[in-house]
Amino acid sequence: MLNKYFRVIVGSFILLSVVLSVYVNQNWMWFTVFIGVNLIQSAFTKWCLLETILVKLGVKKEGGSCSA
């Protein structure tokens, strides 16, 4: 379940930042860059802030989401 929430949230953030960069200001692309860098660092460190937040909110952990 954690994996599903993770993918929906990250995908929504990426789409939202692209739409905001097109219609509001190009600096919103930095948010997309932040998400990408966060995903890359989680591949090496096996730690993901979003995963930690979701677990604290009560989402059941069925395997890692960022590193899976």
Image (spheres, rainbow, N blue to C red):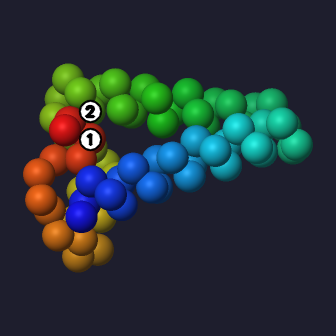
Among the 4 quarters of the image, the one containing residue 4: bottom left
Write down the quadrant of residue 42 in the picture. top left
* Viewer can see residue 2: yes
User: Is residue 53 among the parts visible in the rendering?
Assistant: no
Q: Which residue is mark 2?
A: 42
x and y, in percent, of residue 60 in the image: 17, 70
Q: Residues within 10 Å of mark 1 (few under 14, many from 20)?
A: many
Q: Is residue 61 left or right of residue 65?
A: left
Crowd band around label 2 with a 10 angstrom C-alpha radius: few (<14), some (14–19), many (20+) = some
Q: Amino acid at mark 2?
A: Ser
Which residue: 78% across, 37% down?
Answer: 21
Q: Which mark is residue 66?
A: 1
Q: Residue 16, position in %: x, y?
A: 67, 49
Measured from the top left, where is residue 10 in percent x and y?
Answer: 46, 47
Q: Amino acid at mark 1?
A: Cys
Q: Quick one: which residue is furthest to the right in this view?
A: 23
Give the mark nearer the N terminus: 2 vs 1. 2
The reply, left or right, for residue 33 in relation to residue 42 is right
CA separation, marks 2 and 1? 6 Å
Q: Residue at x 36, y 32 (%)?
A: 39
Q: So how many labels did they put on this image? A: 2
Q: On the rendered structure, is 52 left or right of 10?
A: left
Establish if 2 lies above or below 36: below
Nearer the observer, 40 or 12: 12
User: Is disc 1 placed on a helix, strand or loop?
Assistant: loop
Query: What residue appears at the point 24 percent right and 47 percent down from the top-left corner?
Result: 65
Q: Nearer the viewer, mark 2 or mark 1?
A: 1
Disc 2 + disc 1, Cβ < 8 Å: yes
